[in-house]
Structure formats: structure tokens, C-alpha cells
Image (cartoon, rainbow, N blue to C red):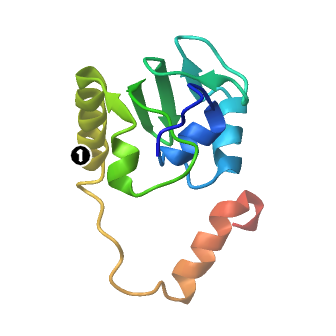
Amino acid sequence: MTDASGTVRLDLWLWAARFFKNRTLSRQAIESGKVEVDGQRPKVSRAVRVDDVLRVTRGEETFEITVLALASKRGSATVAQSLYRESEESKVAREEARAMRAAARVGYEAPRTKPDKRARRLIRALGDIDAL
């Protein structure tokens, strides 16, 4: 599974390590600045090497990882997890952020029934202030 040449394109490696579902999403994340390599904003075709430090922001989660192995083909999840090591600070920060998001949702309760005719009109009116 490891690449013998010693380098792999960044977008290909992120896809193989299962950070993104396809290479297009990987490319878009790199171009929009959601991926950093050794503290710098890389190009999509940048060569990734072993021991590079990556910072990947995916949604609301940020991963700080060190590249342990290279792969140009996508494998199983266990193989993908062996390609990198996440720092302990990153794991703790992600868990804390996840706990904060869960705590923010605690008071929310979904409605038990569909809205009636009057409620639907009020909901529609929220989008158009002049409708009231």
C-alpha cells in the first residue's frame, strides 16, 4: 500500500487517508485553505513526504496529524489510519469541541406533530417580513 517513490500528491494522499470522500473534495479543501502543510498553505500537487505535519480542517473539526506512511491507493479504514498519527492536543481539542456542540443541543426538542395551518403561515412569514 505504501508508495515506493517517496512522495505522493497531497490531494491523493488526503483521499487515500480517508479525510475526504473523493479527490475533488480534497482539492477544494486545499484550494480554500483548509489544509496546511508545515504551517504553510500548499498547492494541490504538493508532494507529501513522511514526517510532514498537516493541519486539516473538515467541517467543524480540525486534525493536526503527522504523516507516517504514503499511499496512492485508497484502502480500508484500518489501513488509512496507519498512514498518519494525530497529536494528543488535537484529539483533546476535538473531543472538547464535540462536547460543547452536544451541550448546546441539550435543550432542543423536535416538534411532535406537524405544524397546523396557522403555524405554517407564520413559518412562511419568517422568510418575508412584509408578509405579516
Residue at x 50% of width, y 43% of height: 59
43 relative position to 121: left or right:
right
The three-letter code of the residue at mark 1 reads Ala
Q: Nearer the viewer, residue 4 or 49?
A: 4
Where disc 1 sits, the SS reads helix
- For the view shown, which residue lies furthest in the top direction? 39
**Quarter-of-image position of residue 83:** top left
- Identify the residue at horizontal 34%, vertical 72% (top origin): 110
State the residue at coordinates (24%, 33%): 96
Alpha-carbon neighbours of circle 1 within 10 Å: few (<14), some, or many (≥20)? few
Q: Which residue is mark 1?
A: 103
Residue 45 position within the rendered picture, expressed as x and y whole percent measured from the top left = 73, 29
**Above or below, comparing residue 119 to residue 83 in the picture:** below
Q: Quarter of the image containing the C terminus?
A: bottom right
Percent x, y for residue 89? Answer: 26, 21
Name the image quarter holding residue 126.
bottom right
Q: Residue at x 52, y 40 (%)?
A: 71
Please tell me which residue lies in front, 42 or 97. Answer: 42
